[in-house]
Amino acid sequence: MTDRTTTAPSGGRLVLTVVAWLWVLIPFLYGVYSLVLKVPALF
Amino acid sequence: MAGGFFDRSSIVAPPGWSRWLVPPAALAVHLGIGQAYAWSVLKTGLGQGLQLSGTATALPFQLAIVMLGLSAAVFGTQVERRGPRWAMAVATACFAAGFLISAAGIAMGQYWLVVVGYGGVGGVGLGIGYISPVSTLIKWFVDRPGMATGIAIMGFGGGALIASPVETALLSGFGTTPGGLASTFLVMGVAYAIFMSLGWLLIRVPPEGWRPPGAPAESEDPAQRGPAVSASKAVRLPQFWFLWIVLCFNVTAGIGILERADGIFRDFFGSTTPAQQLAGAAAAFVAILSLANMLGRFVWSSTSDLVGRKNIYRMYLGLGALLYLVILTLGEGNKVIFLIASLLILSFYGAGFATVPAYLKDLFGTYQVGAIHGRLLTAWSAAGVLGPLIVNAIVDASDVQGPARYTTSFIIMTVLLAIGFVANELIRPVDPKHYVSDAERAAPEGSAAAEDRREGASR
């Protein structure tokens, strides 16, 4: 089978990919940021 | 067979579908169920608001972890057969329902509903959700399975990072009265139902025979196509049990530090850190261990795609054993060495979880890797009992103070890691005589041909 089912997403799929990653990355990075704020107390 | 919305046949990716849409679908589920590791925040609120003991408030979490292992093992084959959308939808429904049942239980003054809701129903969501994206990710990223499962399982480690500040804010806003606690659980349930739904809406499986760009086409010769072992056969092979020991002891060793991280820091540095800074420093140590646990899942699991699964577990187990000895001999009073060694041990702990699906794929193939993974997770349940038992029982029984309290338990961890190292060395490729037939291999789980085969076998 050829590899049409990947890479070079169309415009709509590109937007979907960006939205999907932001959906998970924004809360994740917020969590990491909250954690990193505590680290300086170690030193 | 007509495919319903949740059937595997309904989610075969159309042309142009990017495989990079699969990791966020997996992450939506894993970041959601990873909330379980932030139970301690809710536990504190429940203790204050409902006047419950620490033992009582720990019950929902303990039951949830037991149910995680059990449901992953019991429903693994079902997850493989029905496909990831069904599994992710069930996981979302169970996990969110766990919160909603708990909210109702708190509002009605029936604490047993919190135990059954969060621990029982939610725990089933944890188990099914944990294994739901694994086999799909491996099939999409057959060229980089360690990286793909590393991303998802890093999400499980990262879920607590999101949940912890959110739970703190909700409890602060609603208060810890029964009404406030019920509102907190209600909001959490609704929020997780929405957040995790991205997973089952977005997930797609690759079309049959699909290969990633640049990957060599699958050989027509069955002997060259790599392993394809059924879950029922895998659990009867020594490779499965050697890997079970590897996972169990690697997790046990990580829990050895994770379980008492706060206390370990205080015992090692209590005499050299000003008293007013000690609590903050110990809390920061716990936080930085979480970060190492999470990042190790992605970094080391991705590295395993380059250096091989056996070699990376040699590092987790062999270097992990040496690092425990380093902490014992050089860690006292030397914060830099202590931190480096602890962070590496925790990164290996997380990585052990993240790399194991790819190791299973190498040994048994993608045929039923999700179901085999589910069965292997019983090693996690065993380690969840073994690790805290070793650390708490021995340390609490000790009458000495300071780092010497940990000498016996850390030596036991070193020995367990050495046993795991030997078990890893004993793992050999599976004999092709255990592979499924070509007809079974050609009809993946959930396909019409597989259904016909199953019906034929049952007649």
Image: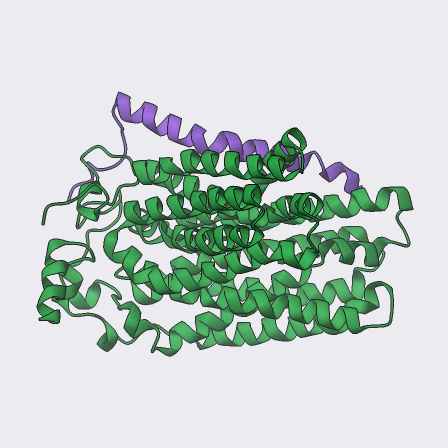
Chain colours: A purple, B green
* As drawn, B182 above or below B297: above
Residue A6 image point, x, y percent: 25, 36
> For the image shown, how many numbered marks are present on the structure?
0
Comparing B86 with B306, the one in front is B86
Name, please, the residue furthest toward the front.
Answer: B108
Which residue is at 30% across, 55% downward? B79
Q: Is residue A25 visible?
A: yes
Report whether B185 appears left or right of B132. Answer: right
Report whether B287 appears left or right of B211. Answer: right
Q: Is residue B210 visible?
A: no
Residue B383 image point, x, y percent: 56, 67
Report whether B282 appears left or right of B318. Answer: right
Which residue is at 80% across, 62% downward? B330
Residue B266 image point, x, y percent: 82, 54
Q: Within the image, what quadrant is residue A14 found in? A: top left
Quarter of the picture holding the C terminus of chain B: bottom left
Which residue is at 47% across, 42% downward? B100
Comparing B68 with B259, the one in front is B68
Report whether B208 appears left or right of A15. Answer: left
* As drawn, B233 above or below B82: below
Q: Within the image, what quadrant is residue B450 found in? A: bottom left
Residue B408 image point, x, y percent: 75, 74
Q: Within the image, what quadrant is residue B456 found in? A: bottom left
Comparing B330 with B293, the one in front is B293
Which residue is at 42% across, 31% downward? A21
